[in-house]
Image: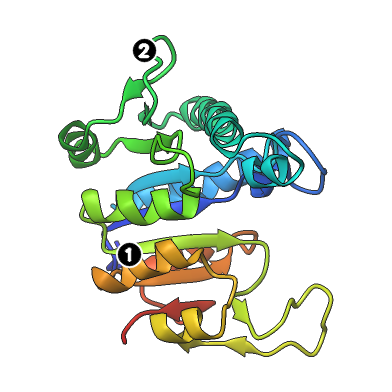
Amino acid sequence: MPKLKYRRVLLKLSGEALAGNEQYGIDPGTVSSICREIISARELGAEIALVIGGGNIFRGVSASSKGMDRASADYMGMLATVMNALAVQDVLEKMNADTRVMSAISMHEVAEPYIRRRALRHLEKKRIVICAAGTGNPFFTTDTAAALRAMELKSDIILKATKVDGVFDRDPVTNPDAVKYDSLTYIDVLSRRLQVMDAAAVSLCMDNCMPVAVFNLFHRDNIIRVLQGEQIGTIVQGG
């Protein structure tokens, strides 16, 4: 069995990733492809927790910019992440994975409450833990929730899965000559205002020396390659 450089990881998925090529909602084929990659990593011995965004269903920030109360909009966004978590759980369990959805907002009929020690126990038992509803508080993004859960669950690294090959100096989708960074420091990300994670999440990672790997989720075996320490995408760490 290949040796893993990172044994316990926090995988951050955007809601948009679940939509595939669609503008809205959940694309079953895309979710199945993502889940196969997650299960392949688990079969190598990785302990995996997920934090999933909700932008494919509802964006709190966008709604608040159009006049909706920010707290109300953020709570709606948290509920969208629960829907995504249940969708991912359903596909993973159809692939015979043992999973638990743990929500920061109590909804006992569909998810366990997020309790740190219980989540750690699930990971120790090789269950895939899907953390839903962000931090449970408005004004915090799911990026910040991912950083927080990574610290709480003693993760070795945050895997920030995207649709591009890493972090670039400009948007590579609209700028074909954009330059990719192989490595960055937390200070680089903050000072250059690079769109890796929001500033609160980056600062939390910096304060706790939590590395972040940014990579393309849609290249086969990329999760495994990162876990094995291969240099793909962009690694954010150090001062």
Question: Which amino acid, by three-letter code, is at mark 2?
Answer: His
Note whether residue 185 is visible: no
Q: Which residue is mark 1?
A: 204
How far across and down, in percent of the image, does residue 221 sit? 53, 62
Q: Identify the image quadrant of residue 72.
A: top right
Residue 209: image location, x then y, percent? 25, 73
Secondary structure of residue under mark 2: loop
| Residue 201 picture quarter | bottom left
Q: Secondary structure at mark 1?
A: helix
- The quadrant in which the C terminus is found is bottom left
Q: CA distance from mark 2 to mark 1?
A: 30 Å
Q: Which quadrant of the view contains residue 83? A: top right
Q: Amino acid at mark 1?
A: Leu
Drawn side of residue 123 relative to residue 84, left or right = left
- Which image quarter is the N terminus in? bottom left
Residue drawn at x 28%, y 52% as measured from the top left: 45
Whether 166 is drawn above or below 94: the answer is below
Q: Which residue appears at 51% of the width and 87% of the height?
A: 182
Foreground: disc 2 or disc 1: 1
Residue 106, given in percent of the width and then of the height, sits at 36, 19
User: Does label 2 or label 1 sit earlier along the sequence?
Assistant: 2
From the viewer's perspective, tell me whether residue 77 is left or right of residue 184. right
Q: Which residue is mark 2?
A: 108
The answer to whether residue 200 shows anywhere in this view is yes
**Residue at (73, 36) in percent of width and height:** 27
Q: Residues within 10 Å of mark 2 (few under 14, many from 20)?
A: few
Instruction: Residue at the far top: name it.
Output: 109
